[in-house]
Image (spheres, grey):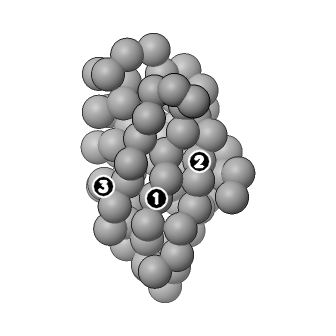
Amino acid sequence: MTNVTLAIQGMTCNHCVMRVRKALAGVPGVHKAVVTLEPGQAKVEYDDSASTADAMTAAVVKAGYSARAVG
């Protein structure tokens, strides 16, 4: 398993958190995503043979938010 933290901008409420969590859960290889409103990030555990940080970032962007990998 590999871990990545995504900085996410544009979330304003718990509904946003749920949308981002759902978007990340739909990415193949993602096992766990913990999304927090403050400080606006997602900590994701995933199988790096099945997914990439870029794929997760793209899923968050498609859900209507901006995201970038920070660690």
Is the residue 49 above or below the residue 31 in the image?
Answer: below
Give residue 9's quadrant in the image.
top right
Q: Circle 2 sits on which residue?
A: 6
Per the image, label 2 sits on a secondary structure element best described as strand
Spot occupied by residue 22 in the image (x, y as percentages of width and height): 29, 43
Q: Secondary structure at mark 3?
A: loop
Q: Is residue 4 left or right of residue 13?
A: right
The image quadrant of residue 31 is bottom left
Q: Are marks 3 and 2 in contact (CB under 8 Å)?
A: no
Disc 3: which residue: 26
Choose between 61 and 41: the one closer to the eye: 41
Q: Which of the marked residues, 2 or 1, is nearer the chain's N terminus?
A: 2
Is 22 on the left or on the right of 3, as rendered? left
The count of marks equals 3
Instruction: Measure the C-alpha gap from mark 3 to mark 2.
Output: 16 Å
- The reply to whether the C-beta atoms of the residues labelled 2 and 1 are less than 8 Å apart is yes
Question: In the image, what residue occupies the spot 43% across and 71% down?
Answer: 46
Q: Which residue is mark 1?
A: 44
> What's the residue at 69%, 58% (across, down)?
71
Taking the view exactly as shown, the residue that stands out farthest to the bottom is: 49
